[in-house]
């Protein structure tokens, strides 16, 4: 986050945004100033750079001047447009025609920005004026209105009809994002027993429901799974009594680039104490879920006793994703540790976290019924199930021993040491 105390910056941003939202007919310029004065907002929304009101020359002596250009942590630049909080995105049927006209204008403006950058001279202007490398396909985010007065059905129809790379976010969602991040940082979850998962990879939007990682040594109790269902992330838990809980969360806009799939960063933390259950999910460094509930019966030793990547506990659910790096702790992380992981990923994958990259990092592809497991997971003991696409029961490694799927010792990987084995090509 910032070098200052992030909780202070978040609290200030939240309080000042609430005052703006309570002010009738607040001008767009006041919201522009609020974003410029509170950079913690961009960081919370998953951006690492932001450029206010860049002046982009056009043919004929004119210029484009979007409210912001913002860059996320995968190197993708977007147009960030601000409208008033009382913009007529109304449920009132008498104003629906006005809304369609106004919102269509906003979308058309974003399409003009996209066309500008689609031409090489537009990207050249951005580099010469601001030293930034903007990719060819530029999405847009429009921030407008509040949830109570938005007709999302009309908004979705206009977005689908006009452009697949324009997204609407309300000030209500901006406020919720700030509050989720504040709760995440302020929660006393440091060192709680549980799980931390950090997955960097290609996580496609157009696949059927799939389980990325499945935790637990018991087949039916004290389990947790992290997965994808189209454009949503889901987290499911089954407690020691066999009761299942599931949370589904929308993913922020992800631009699929023409030169290949883009990398996404997905994080989940599950903290278990005698008094509470803490669950948080981050997507591309943006907190998209923060939950604290009363304690549930969960055997942590079973939960962390084994895991599989690429399927659920049955081994029958196919997957379609690529894992570049996977980091797992059997406890929750502190915000400082989270920043250390971000710094590590930035250092190692700096080249690949750019839309200009022409090479992909090494990755393990999970396609169909191919999965990995650790000793202790039920799949390490289960017989292979006959399928049209037979499971590939790859071996794994632990800190004490190396065991292949058939129980035989693995061939030691000479480059990485005695506790690793080479994975199949």
Image: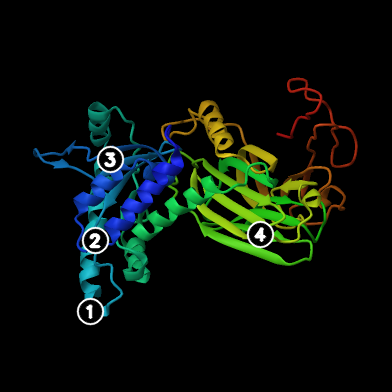
Disc 4/disc 2 C-alpha distance (Å): 40 Å
Q: On the rendered image, what quadrant is the N terminus found in? A: top left
Asked if disc 2 and disc 1 are in contact, CB closer than 8 Å, the reply is: no
Instruction: Evaluate whether residue 86 shows in this view.
Output: yes
Identify the disc placed on residue 94. Answer: 1
**Which residue is denoted by mark 2 in the rendering?**
23
Name the mark nearer the viewer: 3 or 1.
Answer: 1
Identify the disc placed on residue 117. Answer: 3
Q: On the rendered image, what quadrant is the C terminus found in? A: top right
Disc 3/disc 1 C-alpha distance (Å): 37 Å
Disc 4/disc 3 C-alpha distance (Å): 41 Å
Identify the disc placed on residue 286. Answer: none
Q: Position of residue 320 (x, y in %)?
A: 62, 50
Name the mark nearer the viewer: 4 or 3.
Answer: 4
Q: Earlier in the sequence, mark 1 or mark 4?
A: 1
Disc 1/disc 4 C-alpha distance (Å): 42 Å
């Amino acid at each position: 986050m910032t070098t200052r105390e992030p909780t202070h910056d978040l609290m200030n941003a939240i309080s000042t945004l609430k005052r703006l939202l309570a002010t009738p007919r607040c001008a767009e310029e006041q919201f522009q100033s609020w974003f410029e004065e509170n950079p913690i907002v961009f960081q919370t929304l998953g951006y690492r750079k932001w450029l206010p009101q860049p002046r982009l020359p056009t043919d004929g002596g004119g210029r484009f001047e979007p409210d912001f250009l913002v860059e996320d942590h995968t190197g993708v630049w977007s147009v960030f447009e601000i409208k008033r909080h009382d913009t007529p995105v109304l449920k009132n049927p008498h104003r629906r025609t006005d809304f369609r006209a106004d919102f269509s204008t906003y979308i058309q403006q974003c399409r003009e920005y996209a066309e500008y950058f689609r031409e090489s001279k537009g990207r050249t202007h951005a580099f010469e004026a601001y030293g930034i490398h903007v990719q060819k396909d530029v999405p847009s985010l429009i921030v407008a209105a509040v949830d109570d007065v938005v007709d999302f059905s009309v908004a979705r129809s206009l977005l689908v009809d006009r452009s697949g790379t324009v997204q609407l976010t309300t000030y209500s969602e901006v406020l919720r994002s700030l509050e989720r991040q504040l709760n995440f940082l302020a929660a006393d979850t440091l060192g709680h027993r549980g799980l931390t998962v950090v997955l960097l990879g290609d996580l496609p939007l157009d696949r059927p429901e799939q389980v990325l990682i499945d935790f637990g040594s018991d087949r039916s109790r004290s389990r947790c799974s992290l997965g994808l269902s189209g454009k949503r992330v889901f987290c499911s838990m089954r407690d020691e009594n066999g009761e299942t809980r599931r949370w589904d969360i929308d993913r922020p806009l992800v631009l699929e680039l023409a030169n290949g799939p883009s990398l996404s960063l997905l994080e989940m933390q599950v903290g278990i104490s005698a008094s509470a259950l803490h669950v948080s999910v981050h997507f591309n460094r943006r907190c998209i879920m923060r939950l604290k509930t009363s304690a549930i019966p969960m055997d942590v030793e079973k939960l962390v006793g084994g895991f599989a990547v690429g399927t659920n506990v049955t081994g029958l659910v196919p997957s379609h994703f690529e894992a570049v790096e996977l980091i797992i702790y059997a406890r929750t992380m502190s915000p400082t540790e989270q920043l250390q992981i971000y710094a590590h990923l930035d250092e190692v994958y700096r080249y690949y976290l750019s839309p200009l990259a022409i090479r992909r990092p090494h990755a393990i592809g999970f396609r169909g019924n191919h999965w990995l497991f650790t000793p202790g997971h039920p799949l390490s003991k289960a017989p292979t199930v006959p399928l049209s696409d037979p499971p590939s029961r790859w071996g794994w490694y632990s800190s004490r021993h190396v065991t292949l799927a058939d129980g035989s010792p693995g061939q030691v990987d000479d480059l990485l040491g005695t506790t690793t084995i080479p994975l199949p090509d």
